[in-house]
Image: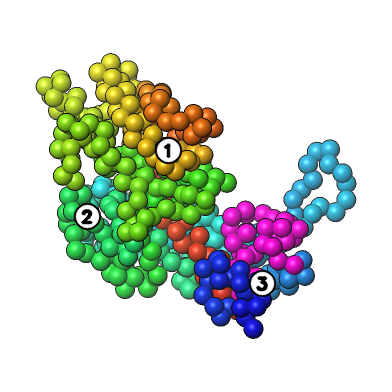
């Protein structure tokens, strides 16, 4: 019986619904291993999948015939022993493709990647989208069509569309855009995009897209417990715990921007007072400087003020860093991450932001939680959102391609 087989039981434990034959399970495990590590030997695949050597060999042969996996060799390094180089295996990059869509407050950006995440097409259109979702979606559909057409990618090999957006998204994929992107309230953009592009669409908020991107392509590779902090017009966090994105029961985990840091502070758009966003977002810092100097200071001007070493701007950034460190201390004490990756517009402040942030975080946390904690800047910058959207599709490749019987490559 199926339930008596150890590998079938493992399938259930991995969340795959029975009945799933063992060949499918083996393909999923091998593809998952090669998704997590781009190049592996057969011996490493046996170790990582827990499958028998003969099973791994049979699965690999099937996947090579299907055009999903290819053989490669690693050149011997200087001083290495002579002999036949080890046979290594990797995903076939042209076996599938992913589209990533990033809709921010001021832009629409689309990329197309191959199966291993190499970007083949990338274009961004400056656009004010908060009040004009129809124009934003028209722009997105046009960019997606151009991405596929200009690269000559077979349409049936595009595995899906990952869609990242700068507002909260619940567990059912519904937008919660009130007070953030007012024109999008009540919309179901995934349905429209699916109908107009013919692609399966998966939706994610910008902070969760950021943590997916940093873990797959950026500063958090090989890390299983991560907090990605996005410091832009809104402040949010994407969190990975033991290798899984932490979403919460409703999908709203990570709203660190609405942690109270000053109970008597300014009224926040969420209805509370003294939220982190009211003191540490670029618009809040710019507003503080505007009041202090008696002239309008824009968020875009902050970077130049910091670069020129303006004392008032640096002091405002330092105060923001203190508040961010205070809010992060709660997060660190609850989640005990190994790495915090900081992205978003405010990262340009560099040490002026990071030093007070680290100091306050350390002061308000237990030594056991911060002794080995690393805090680094994003290595992906403005690309984190769109790469994370594409990663949403790529991360599902093992199940998408492994559960279908492999067919010979065309």
Residue 312, percent from left and from top? 25, 18
Classify 168 as above or below 314.
below
The extreme left residue here reads 294
Q: In the drawing, does residue 372 fall left or right of residue 326?
A: right
Q: Which mark is residue 6?
A: 3
Depth check: 146 or 270 in front? 270
The boundaries of the magenta stretch are 23-52
Element class at badge 3: helix
The extreme bottom residue here reads 1
Residue 160, percent from left and from top? 43, 66
Q: The C terminus appears in which quarter of the rendering? A: bottom right
Going from N to C along the chain, the mark reached first, 2 or 1, is: 2
Residue at 31% of width from left, 73% of height from top? 195
Secondary structure character of the magenta stretch overall: helix
Element class at badge 2: loop
Which of pointers 2 and 3 indicates the residue nearer the eye? Answer: 3
Query: Looking at the image, do the residues carrying marks 2 and 1 touch, with CB atoms under 8 Å apart?
Result: no
**How many marks do you count on the picture?**
3
Q: Which mark is residue 177?
A: 2
The quadrant in which residue 332 appears is top left
Depth check: 96 or 120 in front? 96
Classify 3 as above or below 70.
below
Asked if the stretch drawn in magenta spans residue 51, the answer is: yes
Q: In the drawing, does residue 56 fall left or right of residue 176?
A: right
Callout 3: few (<14), some (14-19), or many (20+) C-alpha neighbours within 10 Å?
Answer: few
* Residue 401 in sight: no
Query: Looking at the image, do the residues carrying marks 1 and 3 touch, with CB atoms under 8 Å apart?
Result: no
Q: Which mark is residue 333?
A: 1
Going from N to C along the chain, the mark reached first, 2 or 3, is: 3
């Amino acid at each position: 019986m199926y339930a008596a087989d150890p590998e079938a039981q493992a399938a259930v434990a991995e969340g795959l619904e029975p009945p799933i034959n063992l060949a499918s399970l083996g393909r999923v495990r091998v593809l998952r291993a090669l998704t997590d590590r781009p190049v592996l030997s057969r011996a490493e695949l046996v170790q990582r999948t827990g499958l028998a050597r003969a099973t791994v060999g049979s699965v690999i042969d099937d996947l090579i015939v299907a055009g999903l996996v290819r053989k490669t060799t690693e050149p011997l390094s200087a001083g290495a022993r002579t002999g036949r180089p080890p046979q290594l295996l990797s995903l076939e990059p042209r076996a599938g493709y992913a589209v990533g869509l990033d809709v921010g407050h001021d832009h629409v950006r689309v990329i197309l990647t191959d199966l291993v995440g190499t970007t083949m097409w990338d274009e961004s259109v400056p656009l004010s989208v908060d009040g004009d979702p129809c124009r934003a979606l028209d722009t997105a559909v046009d960019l997606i069509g151009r991405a596929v057409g200009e690269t000559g990618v077979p349409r049936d090999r595009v595995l899906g569309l990952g869609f990242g957006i700068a507002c909260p998204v619940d567990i059912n994929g519904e937008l919660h855009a009130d007070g953030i992107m007012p024109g999008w309230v009540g919309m179901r953009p995934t349905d429209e995009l699916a109908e107009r592009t013919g692609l399966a669409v998966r939706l994610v908020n910008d902070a969760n897209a950021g943590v997916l991107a940093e873990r797959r392509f950026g500063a958090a590779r090989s890390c299983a417990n991560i907090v990605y902090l996005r410091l832009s017009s809104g402040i949010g966090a994407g969190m990975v715990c033991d290798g899984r994105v932490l979403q919460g029961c409703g999908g709203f985990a990570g709203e660190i921007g609405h942690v109270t840091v000053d109970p008597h502070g300014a009224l926040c758009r969420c209805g509370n007072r003294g939220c982190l966003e009211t003191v540490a977002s670029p618009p809040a810092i710019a507003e503080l400087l505007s009041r202090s100097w008696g002239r309008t200071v824009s968020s875009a001007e902050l970077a130049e003020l910091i670069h020129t070493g303006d004392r008032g701007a640096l002091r405002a950034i330092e105060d923001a860093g203190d508040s961010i460190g205070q809010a992060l201390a709660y997060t660190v004490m609850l989640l005990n991450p190994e790495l915090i990756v900081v992205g978003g517009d405010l990262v340009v402040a560099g040490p002026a932001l990071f030093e007070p942030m680290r100091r306050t975080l350390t002061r308000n946390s237990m030594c056991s939680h911060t002794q080995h904690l690393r805090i680094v800047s994003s290595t992906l910058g403005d690309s984190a959102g769109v790469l994370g959207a594409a990663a949403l599709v790529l991360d599902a490749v093992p199940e998408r391609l492994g559960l279908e019987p492999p067919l010979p490559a065309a």
